């Protein structure tokens, strides 16, 4: 057993190597707490762990929303077994009050899990609040001054947690090219939603049942199964972020340059195209990337811009492994991109946006600067 300094630990010795270890980082020290117990007991525990598929959850609860099982409020580690109850007695370790918005908590969880439940492949799910790249929302922990696991903090954790075969975001508005860029080279595939996520979100019982039946599933298949499970939500998608993602970055960079060069001659057509692009209820500045390229291609006659727009559409299709949406979102294709139209929209969030790897590696912000003024 690998123990962390200062952590009370009652787990068994390290398990034999499994085919998959599934990690669920459950940030419920907020207004989502009432979903914690039910998700453990009705989604993780029905299948539980086996020699081939190990399931581990780090679970943080807080005061005020759920009084079940003695109203425990600390951060507990669960090795999820079939039929397990979400009570203190079932936990293999109590880590006290941990801040789920601190990247070190994530590092400790993944490090502990890989040491004690090693596997050929790893899936990591982030269960909690989300809002794409925007600071101040992802994995919010209310006990710790509403701290959050912002993009720059998550980036600092990536070298320590190592490669993840599949990453799932069971939180709102995470299916953005900016988030995907963060995991490019650090994972094979992501599963996430372009729109807000409701109370059901990922149906872990369906995903774990498939893994139990076929533990030889690859990362793409687990991402697809995750996306397919979330049938109660408006949108979901699975996207490849390994070497296949490079072509999309190149396409967007070339498209950005072409749009910038053609701005003076085509501004009014851009206005129409950006205005027609599908946006999202919770975040209107997040727009569907494919639909934006489609509208530009449809409305602008410049041959180079049309070709670059088509290249973006082709690249999106190449990395989207699965995508589903309700009819009201029929124009979405699985990936959003941030877009602003007015200079007044350049606030502190925009300053933060310009620090992201996606922005640093493409000309998208140059296009936004030129277009918005």
Image: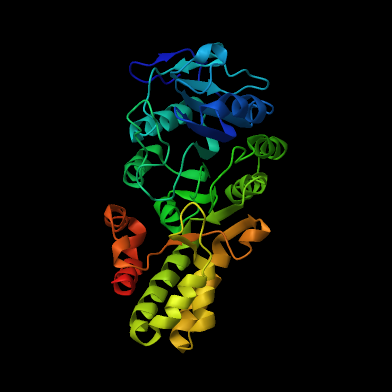
Location of the C terminus by quadrant is bottom left
Task: Point out residue 59 in the picture as x, y percentages from the top left corner.
Answer: 49, 25
**x, y percentage for residue 100?**
40, 31
> Does residue 165 lie above or below 341 as drawn?
above
Q: Nearer the viewer, residue 154 or 141?
A: 141
User: With 259 as the anchor, is 350 left or right in this view?
Assistant: left
Up/down of 45 relative to 316, above or below:
above
The image quarter in which residue 119 lies: top right
Give the colour scheme of this rendering.
rainbow
Would residue 315 be seen by someone viewing this image from the given angle?
A: no
Residue at image coords 64%, 32%: 52
User: Which residue in the rendered view is the most extreme toward the front?
Assistant: 344
Q: Is residue 230 left or right of residue 6?
A: right
Q: Is residue 95 above or below residue 307?
A: above
* Camera-nearest residue between 118 and 230: 230
Q: Where is residue 336 in the image (x, y as percent from the top left)?
A: 49, 60
**Is residue 324 something one can see in this rendering?**
yes
Foreground residue, 225 or 261?
261
Tell me if residue 350 comes above or below residue 135 in the rendering: below
Q: Which of 215 and 44 is in front in this view?
A: 44
Please state, as top left, top right, bottom left or bottom right, where the N terminus lies in the image.
top left
At 48% across and 31% down in the image, what residue appears? 31
Q: Where is residue 180 in the image (x, y as percent from the top left)?
A: 45, 54
């Amino acid at each position: 057993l690998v123990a962390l300094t200062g952590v009370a630990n009652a787990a068994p010795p390290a398990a034999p190597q499994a085919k998959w270890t599934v990690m669920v980082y459950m940030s419920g020290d907020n207004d989502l707490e009432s979903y914690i117990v039910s998700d453990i007991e009705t989604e993780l525990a029905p299948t539980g762990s086996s020699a081939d598929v190990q399931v581990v959850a780090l679970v943080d609860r807080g005061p005020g929303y759920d009084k079940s099982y003695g109203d425990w409020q600390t951060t507990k580690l669960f090795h999820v077994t079939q039929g397990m109850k979400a009570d203190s007695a079932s936990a293999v370790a109590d880590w006290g009050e941990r801040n789920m918005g601190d990247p070190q908590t994530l590092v400790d969880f993944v490090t502990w899990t890989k040491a004690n439940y090693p596997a050929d492949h790893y899936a990591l799910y982030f269960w909690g609040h989300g809002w794409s790249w925007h600071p101040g929302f992802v994995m919010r922990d209310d006990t710790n001054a509403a701290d959050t696991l912002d993009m720059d903090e998550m980036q600092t954790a990536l070298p320590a947690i190592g490669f993840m075969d599949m990453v799932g975001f069971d939180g709102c508005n995470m299916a953005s090219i900016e988030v995907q860029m963060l995991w490019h080279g650090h994972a094979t595939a992501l599963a996430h939603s372009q729109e807000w996520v409701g109370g059901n979100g990922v149906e872990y019982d369906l995903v774990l049942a498939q893994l139990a039946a076929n533990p030889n599933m690859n990362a793409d298949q687990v991402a697809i199964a995750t996306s397919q499970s979330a049938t109660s939500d408006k949108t979901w998608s699975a996207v490849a972020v390994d070497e296949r993602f490079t072509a999309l970055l190149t396409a967007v960079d070339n498209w950005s340059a072409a749009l910038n060069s053609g701005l003076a001659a085509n501004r009014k057509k851009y206005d129409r195209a950006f205005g027609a692009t599908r946006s999202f209820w919770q975040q209107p500045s997040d727009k569907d990337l494919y639909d934006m390229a489609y509208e530009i291609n449809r409305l602008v006659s410049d041959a180079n811009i049309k070709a670059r727009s088509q290249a973006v559409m082709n690249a999106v299709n190449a990395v989207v492994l699965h995508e589903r949406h309700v009819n009201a979102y029929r124009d979405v294709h699985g990936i959003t991109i941030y877009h602003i139209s007015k200079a007044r929209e350049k606030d502190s969030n925009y300053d933060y946006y310009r620090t992201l790897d996606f922005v640093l590696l493409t000309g998208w912000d140059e296009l936004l600067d030129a277009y918005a003024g």
